[in-house]
Image: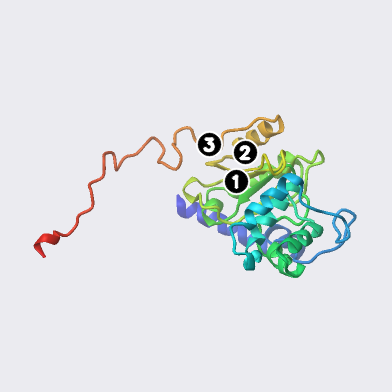
Amino acid sequence: MLARLAAKRLLEIRQVFRQPTSQASRSLSTALNYHLDSPDNKPDLPWEFSEANKSKVKEILSYYPTNYKQSAVIPLLDLAQQQHGGWLPVSAMNAVAKVIEVAPIRVYEVATFYSMFNRAKVGKYHLLVCGTTPCMIRGSRDIESALLDHLGVKRGEVTKDGLFSVGEMECMGCCVNAPMITVADYSNGSDGYTYNYFEDLTPEKVVDIVEKLRKGEKPPHGTQNPQRIKCGPEGGNTTLLGEPKPPQFRDLDAC
């Protein structure tokens, strides 16, 4: 059965590559790594960390030697993104560059390399579907299609109410609970920011999660299969039912 599922998914991938270039690139490529000024994203717009976050900036910098401030670039960008509703305008990157005393291009290099940083607006709930092989074999494309159809958006777009956006993330380490998504919750700013995994999904379950978030509820994260505990097997363990034996050691006195 697993072989049939893998063959089906491989056929779907081949069909995507046979599509016209523009459609295939929308489906499989990431955003281009260049900046175009827009009314809400240009270098001359003022941006600075909030008073509450300035203390967090000092705390982050304290983890690094004073002559290695640039090592704090990733946590500072993450803090700036949380403060700015889930995305990084170029003025926020410039503010980070000023804090760590480097040329702005050094910050741009990091922000364009890591997919965790969003350089365009996202929803208050940014839904990231895992698209790596185990999740794809287990139906991640169906999960993504259910989200896009239910929300009426394309990948990378934000719903009209500003609540939701959908993106793709590569392996998030929950292969045993595939398929899964993560929800980056920017609805309460940097103080209430959460990043939770939802696993063992079906199209119906992922739509239910969206509707609970829309109502302001906090759906339980982790596995959505009631027959599993975390990443344990469905129905409970069938092996390792008792205390494991201690490891064997050499008898050093006999040496």
Of labels 1 and 3, earlier in sequence is 1
Q: Look at label 3 and name its amino acid.
A: Gln
Q: Residue at x 55, y 46 (%)?
A: 179
Q: Look at label 1 and name its amino acid.
A: Ile
List x then y, in percent, for residue 144.
65, 47
The nearer-to-camera label among 2 and 1 is 1
C-alpha gap between disc 2 and disc 3: 9 Å
The residue wearing badge 1 is: 181
Q: Look at label 2 and name its amino acid.
A: Val
Q: Are marks 2 and 1 in contact (CB under 8 Å)?
A: yes
C-alpha gap between disc 1 and disc 3: 11 Å
C-alpha gap between disc 2 and disc 1: 9 Å
Residue 121 in sight here? yes
Looking at the image, is 252 positioned above or below residue 130?
below
Label 3: few (<14), some or many (≥20) within 10 Å? many
Return the residue found at the far front.
66
Q: Residue at x 74, y 40 (%)?
A: 151
Q: Residue at x 60, y 46 (%)?
A: 181
Q: Which of these two is toward me, 36 or 177?
A: 36
Of labels 2 and 3, earlier in sequence is 2
Q: Quadrant of residue 64?
A: bottom right
List x then y, in percent, for residue 101.
73, 66
Of labels 2 and 1, earlier in sequence is 1
The residue wearing badge 2 is: 206
